[in-house]
Amino acid sequence: MFENGHYKTHLLPPPTRDSILTVSLSNAIPIPDSAIVVGHTVMKAPLQKFVDYDRFVTYARNEAARLGGNMMKINTFHGLIHTKWIRQGIYTTVYRMKEPDLARFQQQLDSAARHYADSIRSMAIIHIRDRDIQGERVVYFNDSIVARIKGVGFDAVRNPGRSDLVFRQKGVLRVGPAPPSHLDIELGKEYFILLYMGTSRQGFHYYYQLTDKEHFYYKLL
């Protein structure tokens, strides 16, 4: 833990602190001028390939509460290349806001989320990234080819193949010919999909992992 210029080694408390208003990495709504900065935190995982994004957010919220904040802005979420491994980290700014400013800001965030949900009610938006080894992934929608994503070897981790798709009807999204890699698509939703390769008795297959928006834009430095 790196906090306000100093490293801390104590363990964080396990329970989630629901009282912390969390402003996501992708949220473009500016922080109100009345918010007072009470600290900055950096949390890094042990050296391993991937850690669940929600776990980072949970611990960051705990630390924000410990610092006396009631709002947290996620500034960056990324990994650090360290030999062959990836070390993930989350960087946040912790704020303290008085009521009713905090409640008004929460309403503003909720209103923006509702407006966006209404705006995509008649469509489905799909974002796909491929982090696996080189090769071409063929993406089907209702058995029609809608995208070809080209892997770029090791650099696919840092600069993966990507496709952004918009549909105005429900359907089935499928990656390659393997049956396990299909997903039912509904209107009014936005999907963030990471592709990866797995093995079975029949050989290699490409599968998908649904993820949150923040983890989809995960950065590797």
Image (cartoon, rainbow, N blue to C red):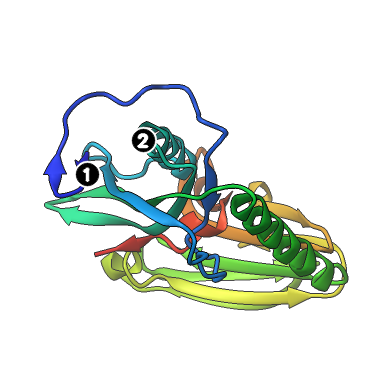
Please give the name of the residue rendered at 47% of the width and 22% of the height, measured from the top-left corner: 15
- Is the residue 74 above or below the residue 60 in the image? below
Q: Quadrant of residue 172?
A: bottom right
Few, some or many residues within 10 Å of mark 2 (<14, 14–19, 20+):
many
Residue denoted by label 2: 63
Coordinates of residue 2 in the picture (x, y in percent): 19, 44
Q: Give the label on residue 38, or none.
A: none
Q: Is residue 124 left or right of residue 153?
A: right
Q: Residue at x 40, y 55 (%)?
A: 36
Q: CA distance from mark 1 to mark 2?
A: 10 Å
The three-letter code of the residue at mark 2 reads: Glu
Total labels drawn: 2
Q: Nearer the viewer, residue 115 or 48?
A: 115
Image location of residue 6, percent across then percent down: 13, 43
In the rendered structure, the answer to whether residue 204 lies left or right of residue 42 reads right
Secondary structure type for disc 1? strand
SS at badge 2: helix
Rendering coords of residue 219 (x, y %):
35, 63
The vertical placement of 13 against 202, above or below, is above
Q: Residue at position x 52%, y 70% from top?
A: 30
The numbered mark, 1 or 2, whose residue comes first in the sequence reads 1
- The one nearer the camera, 181 or 201, is 181
Q: Amino acid at mark 1?
A: Glu
Return the x and y of residue 102 as percentages of the image width and height.
60, 51
Residue that label 1 marks: 3
User: Which residue is rendered at x = 73% and y = 76% of the image?
Assistant: 166
Query: Pointer 1: residues within 10 angstroms few (<14), some, or many (20+)?
Result: some
Q: Are marks 1 and 2 in contact (CB under 8 Å)?
A: yes
Q: Nearer the viewer, residue 57 or 206?
A: 57
Quadrant location of the C terminus in the rendered image:
bottom left
Identify whether 171 is placed above or below 72: below
Where is the N terminus found, in terms of image quarters?
top left
